[in-house]
Image: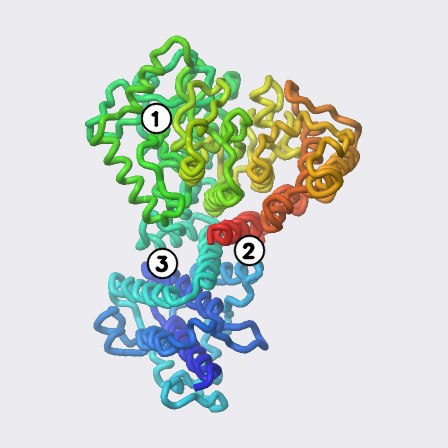
Amino acid sequence: MEPGTYISIAQIAFEGACLAVKTFRHGLHFSEDAERLVLALEVERFRLHIWGENAGLAPPDGQRATLPDRLVPICGILKEYLSQIENQFQNADVMSSRYGLVVTEAPPTKSALVRQLVERMQRSIHTSGRSGIRLSGVSKSEEDGDDDEKWEGDADAANLDHPPERTERRKTSTWKKVRWAVRDLDKFDSLVKDLAQRINKLNELMTETQLRKTREDNYRVNMVVVGSAVDEASLELIRAAVRGQPDTSQVRAAVERKALTVAGSSPSASSRSAAAVNTSRLQALSLDEFILPSGFADLKRFITFKHSDSCGSAAYGGPYLLERKPFDASMLPADMAVLTSRIQRLVLLLQKPKTPDFRTPHAEGCIRDPTNSCWWIVFRYPPPLLPSSASASPQQQQQQQQQQQQQQQQQPDLLRRQLLLLLRSSSTKGGAPISLLTLLQPSARFRPPLEQRVRLASTLCTTLSELYLSGWLHKGVRAENILFPLAGVSLSSSSPPLPLLEKEEEKEKEEKMQRILASPLIAGFDYSRHETERATIDRARRGVGGNNAVAAALYRHPSYQGEAAQGYRVQYDVYSVGLVLVEIALWMPLASFLDAKKKRVDHHHASGGGGGAAAVTRDLVAALQLGASSAGKVGDGDGGGGSVELSGDMKVFHEPHALELKKRVTARVEAELAFRVGSPFYRAVKFCLEFAGRNNGEEVDDPGEVGVHPAMEFYDNVVVPLAGLASNLQD
């Protein structure tokens, strides 16, 4: 047969499967307690249409269906899988005996809540540019049954021995008019799960490119599902709908993270109601339980152990990471209550089960330290005993983590003994984790190749995307908060970094760099909150108080500098991400831009004479000079203003300084980034730096319309292209 015949067979089988699911759904009668399963069925309908679109069988209007060459020879298998879905919803005996459904004369149930969620999901998918994903039956006319007399394609005509004639059409067949009622919730749940498994089998037949595209679209659907939880009723319905999935699945983990803010999820909710959180699951901890290094109160974070933990104990034996979160001692009690709630919910957020892509340390609890006016968040910190393979799958990485925990309990804990000696030494302030900022220092002599840097950038952005997926903000995205457990422990957070790979052979260096960069953890959540909480009550935005305060202020958006800053938004987080991406691309700390010279450099000092690198250098210098008086090509309406001096030892950093820094970074990005790391990386960085200005502070009218939500835009413009670039470099 001709390839076109195979395509027609597959397309008719796909349309038949979609029609069967749609017809069943529209004739379904169910009680209120089955709403969660009906919503889960709607999500699977989305997934089926996503598969059809990415396989080429559901093309946009006016275009012909296609199949990649790899799928044409297995068209019969495609037809068989799709026919199984169609038969699943047409076989009356199976419906009754296996799935607990009964034929009924009762009218189809019209759930306002389910319909509202599905319509919001559909609109969000369209708004996000995924217009090809269409679910027939969302409109009111179809809910009311007005489509019963529509002409449908003859799904039975798909036969390998007799090529179909698409010119014949027939009206609704008898089986379409059968109405079913849900009698047994557990059996009906099996129907939804069986449909999901059959769709998974279809996904397994796709090419790697198609499968990647399908995963991206499924992520978008998950984002829409989670974003549709705009109040307590919709949130609880969605939680119930995904409860059957593993607790480490993407959508369930995101919904559970969002559920932490159910009291404050409505824009009308007061800050006091938002502060209400169930803290019964929080472990009671005390500083007295831990071995504290000298001068610990001045440290941002340090690694330690508990006094009572031993290597062979069944309980977790450490090490632990303690991270300091200062607060204003003169804060009003009401503000302190809200701040306390944020800390507690942050701990709960970082305790919950997560996907392998959500790279954050596991939180044990928090300790209030009124003596030093701070909180201490206690994390489990992975010991560098069993390196993870950079090429391992998420499942393999999870297995390696489990093996690492077993190894820690079964073998002598050398790290513990070494660190205990370090902590008890009077000449040191304890052990600090190795951060991205440490690795970026020239003295570290850590120079990873392009593919490792791109993979690192992709991994970090994927983690942050999952955070934004559930509506949370980080508020502290910067190089010092990206940690690498496999890199070991520094003698002190204030000591200069030592060469990590000085004695390694060249091949060993590359392998060790790969292992280190493949396992980052994002820490340093600065009083993080859900995006629906509008109050700004912490002092993290101040750029006054010495080098540490300035170092943090460098990464904040110009509009969120100084005491006047209000209303932190996800766009400001994305701006910080852009600066970190610049650091990774150039492999240099952001603070290097503070001492950048804006005068023309003699071209004889540039390598390559009059061309090549010298030309890039001249272009860069010219761009820097342009950046001194204008915002360059990347910007968000920032004014020029007068000349602002920046230096590495400055003690104050406010909006004018942030604008000047942004101009310098922008000039470097425009002149050099595409050349160094490729156009996809350049465009991702450019998006991050521009994003806040593009939106101009406008809020989405309906918080459930995630198609225009910053989280969706960040995923489409940053996560997807970086993941694609990382995959291409790996191949």
Q: Relative to 704, is 631 above or below?
A: above
In the drawing, does residue 414 fall left or right of residue 730? left
> What scheme was used to colour the molecule?
rainbow
Amino acid type, label 2: Gly
Q: Nearer the viewer, residue 31 or 171?
A: 171
Image point (32%, 16%), residue name: 291
Question: Dot 3, how many residues are within 10 Å of its Cα: few (below 14), some (14-19), or many (20+)?
Answer: many
Amino acid type, label 3: Arg
In the drawing, does residue 554 fall left or right of residue 104? right
**Whole-percent x and y of residue 626?**
78, 37
- Gap between marks 3 and 2 measured at Cα: 23 Å
Q: Relative to 9, is 444 above or below?
A: above
Query: Which residue is under mark 3?
Result: 36
In the drawing, does residue 357 fall left or right of residue 717? left
Callout 3: SS: helix
Badge nearest the viewer, 2 or 1: 1
Query: Which residue is under mark 2?
Result: 707
User: Of label 3 and label 1, which has the lower sequence position?
Assistant: 3
In the drawing, does residue 361 fall left or right of residue 457? left
Give the mark count: 3
- Residue 149, can we see it? no
- Residue 278, can we see it? yes
- Gap between marks 3 and 1 measured at Cα: 40 Å
Amino acid type, label 1: Tyr
- Gap between marks 2 and 1 measured at Cα: 40 Å
Image point (34%, 66%), residue name: 201
**Whole-percent x and y of residue 44?**
39, 64
Query: Which residue is under mark 1?
Result: 320
